[in-house]
Amino acid sequence: MQLFVEDLTCVRGGRTVFAGLSFDVSDGRGVELTGPNGSGKSSLLRMLAGFVPAAQGQIRLEGGDDDAALGEQCHYVGHLNGVKRAFTVYENLAFWADYLGGGDVMAALEAFQLENLGGIPAGLLSAGQARRLGLARLTLVHRPLWLLDEPSVSLDEGSRKILASAIRDHMKTGGMAIAATHMPLGVAFAQTLKLGAGRG
Amino acid sequence: MHAFMRLVARDVRLALREGGAVSTALGFYLVVVAILPLGLGPDLNLLARIAPGVLWVSLLLAALLSVERIFHNDMEDGTLEVIALGPLPLELVAAAKSLAHWISIGIPLALAAPVLALLLNLPAEAFWVLLLTMITGTPAISFLGAVGAALTLGLRRGGLLLALLVLPLYVPILVFGVSTMNAVITGPAPFLSSYLILCALTLATVVLAPIAAAAALRLSLS
C-alpha cells in the first residue's frame, strides 16, 4: 500500500498556505511534519483525511481497499480528542469499536494504560488521560494510515513512550503514520517534511 | 445499517444521559401553553378555538431549543470528525442524528401535547388527531432543524440565527398540522387531504433535509 501526494496546494481563506507539495509514503514508513505555526501542518492532515478539499493536486492511496474512501482507511487524531464526557471511558471506546467496525476494547484500554479507568465518566478524566483515550482509538480499530496532529500534547513522559511504541508497532506491522509535531515523538520516521521553509 | 442504528442509539442514550435537553423542552412546552390562558383570559370557547395553533406553535419553539444540540456537541468535542471518517456518508450521519433527535425530543413533546391540550379546553374528539398530527409532523421538525443546526455550526451563539433560519421553514408543517386538526374540530374541510399533505411534507423533508445538512457539515468540517 502506498500513499501518493502530488502537487498539492492548500488555500485557506484566500491565502495560499503551501503549494506544489509532493511526497509519498509506503508500507511501514512514517512522515514527520515540522514547520512553524501556520505553515499548514494541520491543514495538510485535514486534507489527507478528506475534510479540507484540495485547491489543486491530488491524494491517492494505492493498494488499499478500493471501495472505501481514503477517509475510511485512516485514523485522524486532531486537536480535539473525540471523547464524549457523558459516557464512561469504556463506553466511549465500545461505541467507536461498534461504529468504526470491530475491535478489542479491553486491549485498546490496556495499550494506553486506561484499564483501571474503564468505569469512570470521561468528563472526569485529566487532560492527559482524555488524550490517551482519544489515542486509544488508534489501536482499537485497525486502519492503515494514521494522521496525528500534535499527538503528544498534554501527555506525560510515560504516556509519550506508550504513544511512541504504539506508532512503532503500527509501522512494524505495515502501517503508515504521518505526524505533525513540534516535539520529537521518539519514533524514527523515514522522512521529515518541513513545511513553510523560508517563510519564517 | 448496523452503524446507522448504533449512531441513533448512541445519540438517544446521550440525550437521556445528559438529561437537560428532554426536560427543558418539556418544561418549556408546559410553561408556554400554561401561560397563554393567563394572558387571554378564561374564555373557554376562545381557548378551544385557538388550541390547535397554540399547541403547534409552542411545540415548534420547544423543539427549537434543543435542535442546536444535534451537531453542536459532537463538533465541539471532536467526535463529529471521527464519525465523519466512519462507514456512513455524511447524509446518513445527518439522518441518523435527526432521527435520534426525533426519538429523544420529538416523541416526548408529541406525547405531552394531549396532556397540555386539557389546559386549553381542546374538544375531546380532537385528541386523537392532535396526537396523530404531532407524531406525523415532528420528524419534519427534527430533520429541518438539523439543516439549520449544521449551517450554524461554526458560529458562537448560533442559537438565535438558527431560530431565524429554521422557523420560516416550519411554516408548511404548522399550517397543515393545524388545518388537519381544524378539519376535525370545526370542519368543513376534509380531514384526509390536509393530513396527507402533512405526511407528504414530512416524507419529503426526511429524504431531502439530510442532503442539505450534509452539505453544510462538509463546509463546517473543512
Image: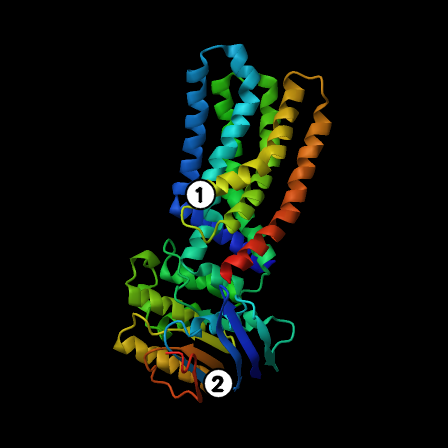
x and y percent of residue A136 in the render?
Answer: 40, 70
Which residue is disc 1 drawn over? B159
- Identified by mark 1, the residue type is Gly
Residue A116 in the image: state x and y as whole percent. Answer: 30, 66
Kindly identify the residue that appears in the image at 55 percent across and 15 percent down: B48
Q: Position of residue B11 (x, y in %)?
A: 48, 51
Left or right: where does residue A26 sit relative to residue B14?
A: right
* Scheme of image coloration: rainbow
Report the residue that reaches farthest toward the left.
A157
**Relative to the observer, which residue lies in front, A167 or A179?**
A179
Q: Residues within 10 Å of mark 1 (few under 14, many from 20)?
A: many
In this view, the mark in front (2 or 1): 1
User: Can see residue A139?
Assistant: no
Q: Residue at x 55, y 70 (%)?
A: A71
Quarter containing the C terminus of chain A: bottom left
Q: Residue at x 57, y 45 (%)?
A: B143
Residue B70 sits above or below residue A66 on the image: above
Could you tell me which quadrant the N terminus of chain A lies in?
Answer: bottom right
Pointers 2 and 1 in contact (C-beta within 8 Å):
no
Residue A118's image quarter? bottom left
Asked if one can make out residue A188 in the rendered structure from this viewpoint, the answer is yes
Q: CA distance from mark 2 to mark 1?
A: 47 Å
User: Does dot 2 land on a helix, a strand or a loop?
Assistant: loop
* Of B169 and A18, the residue lying toward us: A18
Q: Secondary structure at mark 1?
A: helix
The image shows residue B9, relative to residue A157, as above or below, that is: above
The percent coordinates of residue A84 (x first, y second) are 40, 57
Q: Amino acid at mark 2?
A: Thr
Horizontal side of residue B155 vs B103, given as left or right: left
Tags 2 and 1 both on a single chain: no
Quadrant of residue B129 within the rendered picture: top right
Residue under label 2, please give it.
A173
